[in-house]
Image (cartoon, rainbow, N blue to C red):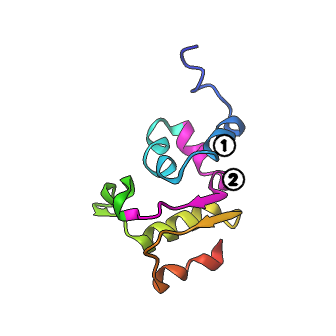
Amino acid sequence: MDGAWENLNSDCLVNVFRRLDLESKLLDIPFVCKQWNQALLNPLCWQELVFPVDVSQSRLADAPKNGESYNNPGLIKFVVRRSQGCATRLELPNDISEEDLVYIPDV
């Protein structure tokens, strides 16, 4: 059974990844291997955009991105772009601002 995950085709990986929470898609899966990262780029993996209720209390708050912590506007923009218009569900964090809402029409 060793290596079975590495040998899954992209369609199977996308089917699994689309069911994962947002934190796993951002903080775990991209770093497993190139194949998993490539599969995660499929917009079908980003149909459900469910943000933590309080981003500051989630793993995302401590995750560095380009040397800085995630912030809501940047995080929302990044995730919405990943969906490439395929999002079917959107749940935003409690502390959303008007600035954050600018990216919502792209969903």
The vertical placement of 78 against 106, above or below, is: above
Tell me the distance, in whole angstroms, between the alpha carbons under discs 1 and 2. 7 Å
Q: Earlier in the sequence, mark 1 or mark 2?
A: 1
Residue at figure coordinates x 44%, y 74% from the top left? 73
Residue wearing tag 1: 14
Part of the protein shown in magenta = 35-55
Across and down, in percent, residue 74 comes to 43, 71
Q: Amino acid at mark 1?
A: Val
Q: Residue furthest top?
A: 1
User: Is 39 in the magenta?
Assistant: yes
Across and down, in percent, residue 59 comes to 37, 52
Give neighbour class at mark 1: few <14, some 14-19, many 20+ (Cα, 10 Å): many
Q: Amino acid at mark 2?
A: Leu
Q: Secondary structure at mark 2?
A: helix
What number of labels is visible?
2
Residue wearing tag 2: 44
The vertical placement of 96 against 86, above or below, is: below
The answer to whether residue 54 is left or right of residue 91 is left
